[in-house]
Amino acid sequence: MSHPIDVVVTGLGATTPLGGDVPSTWAAALAGESGARPFEHDWSTEYGIPVEFAATLKVKPEDVLPRPELKKMDPSAQYAIIAAREAWADAGSPDVDGTRLGAVVSSGIGGIWTTLDGWDTLREKGARRVLPMTVPMLMPNSPVAYVSLEFGAKAGAHALVSACASGAEAIGYGVDMIRAGRADVVIAGGTEATIHPMPIAAFAASRTLSLRNDDPQGASRPYDVDRDGFVIGEGAGVVVLESAAHAAARGARVYGRIAGVGLSADGYHITSPEPSGDGQIRAMNMALGESGVSAREVVHVNAHATSTVVGDLIEARSIRGVLGDDSDHVALSATKSMTGHLLGGAGALETIFTVLAVHERQAPPTINVATPDPELVLDLVRDKPRELPTGDIAALNNSFGFGGHNVALVVTSA
Amino acid sequence: MAYSEQEILAGLAEIVSEETGLPTDSVLAEKSFTDDLDIDSLSMMTIVTLAEEKFDVRIPDDEVKNLATVGDAVSFIAGAQA
């Protein structure tokens, strides 16, 4: 039984390790490119950091935004505003009453560059040199606040924080705002900018990062037997969500529909996913139930699949647990193999990939899988994109986060 | 070494330009920070913080409200130099 208010996607925007916008990012993803590259600085020598690479942005904000904006925004907000501007223009800059326009943009970690720069300044130069913009730049709602200011989004501006599920949760919340009647249009997405030596050292300390320093582009290899952790990425993805009625009234181009939102928590461990996948299964079932989509209609899954040893398999088993034998005809894609892990931006970027996969009938590839894990019980799209069926189709996007957050979104063709 | 008023104006114009995006040659002595350059109180405090560092002076918070124009700030900084 689907919800009476249909929510469609009418605009897409992103800045990612694969490209400075959605068309270049999507083209690179279909071509199976990797966004991983060595750090510009030698943090190994300077700080003893064991990881020497990351999936950094392809196009630097310095090349896109004017100086005053760069100085007033943490990189996490810069990436978000770049993606939001693209999404808004892509949607045809809808004419909407500001009190009916919402904004939901999340970051998993927040303005950590600003936080650490402020601390450095305090220690080196004293309190008098700490800049007045430090708090409005470091607060985790700063990206959504700037988006709200820019587009006059007054129906509500929200920043939901759920680590690596944040971007997908933001889109799910945006869908709910429209369904609850609080907005007609919502700008929703996620952003992250944490490629700074401190968080890199901290992630490395938790032993979750790949250490494949001799082959950065081959390091993110979800479902490969030799995967050894995730590749940290950065960037943002933003979509424009709209009630189907509002989109139809203005003759908007519709990419697809977010037909179901599923949310759950593991309540199990601060970083490890619950081994049975119960929370993930509940999220996927909730999203499917809300969408009215049957397991048989699901032709594609964009997996959370970060390339960690334990996490990838738990998710694969959860997907089979939900879809049963119908998972045999599901094209499974793990796009973090190309983009790295954008943390709070990941769920939003992967929703964009899922929407485009359904819209263009092309499942993006998973790269770097030399030898699939023998325990993988799903059909992985490897190296080249795969054509998806014509007619009405549905896809799932999963996003999970440290803390036990699970988000599943069902995307259907328009 | 003390900065001349001309050097202070040029340095201040750079700071204001970075903060606002206005070209440096529009930051003239007679311009009002609020009315002409559209600088809000948070931006003004940013400019004060950066100017203190650049010219190695102290601009007390009580003084900031008296700095209506760019010229006022130049004069204050010139006088405050040790």
Image (spheres, rainbow, N blue to C red):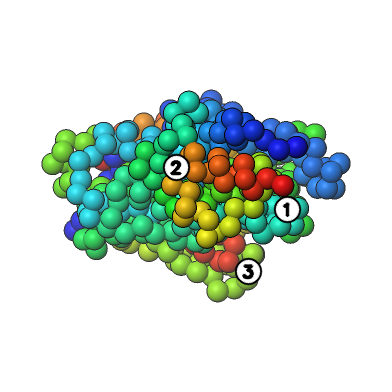
Q: Earlier in the sequence, mark 3 or mark 1?
A: 1
Q: Which chain contains the residue that carries disc 3?
A: A
Inspect the image, locate mark 1, and give the three-letter code of the amino acid beneath it.
Answer: Lys
On the image, the x and y values in percent for residue A197 come to 73, 48
On the image, the x and y values in percent for residue B63 come to 53, 56
Mark 3 vs mark 1, foreground winner is 1
Q: Dot 1: few (<14), some (14–19), or many (≥20) neighbours within 10 Å?
A: few
Q: Is residue A188 visible?
A: yes
Inspect the image, locate mark 2, and give the three-letter code of the amino acid beneath it.
Answer: Thr
Q: Is residue A385 visible?
A: no
Task: State the separation of the CA atoms marked 3 and 1.
Answer: 37 Å
* Residue A40, picture quadrant: top right
Q: Secondary structure at mark 2?
A: loop
Residue placed at 66% from the left, 41% from the top? B54
Q: Are marks 2 and 1 in contact (CB under 8 Å)?
A: no
Labels in figure, total? 3
Q: Which chain contains the residue that carries disc 2?
A: B
Q: Dot 2: few (<14), some (14–19), or many (≥20) neighbours within 10 Å?
A: some
The numbered disc on residue B69 is 2
* Residue A174, picture quadrant: bottom left
Inspect the image, locate mark 3, and give the three-letter code of the amino acid beneath it.
Answer: Ile
Q: Are marks 3 and 1 on the same chain?
A: yes
Q: Is residue A270 above or below residue A248?
A: below
Residue placed at 43% from the left, 47% from the top? B68
Q: Is residue A34 above or below residue A77?
A: above
Residue placed at 62% from the left, 41% from the top? B78
Q: Quadrant of the C terminus of chain A?
A: top left
The numbered disc on residue A323 is none
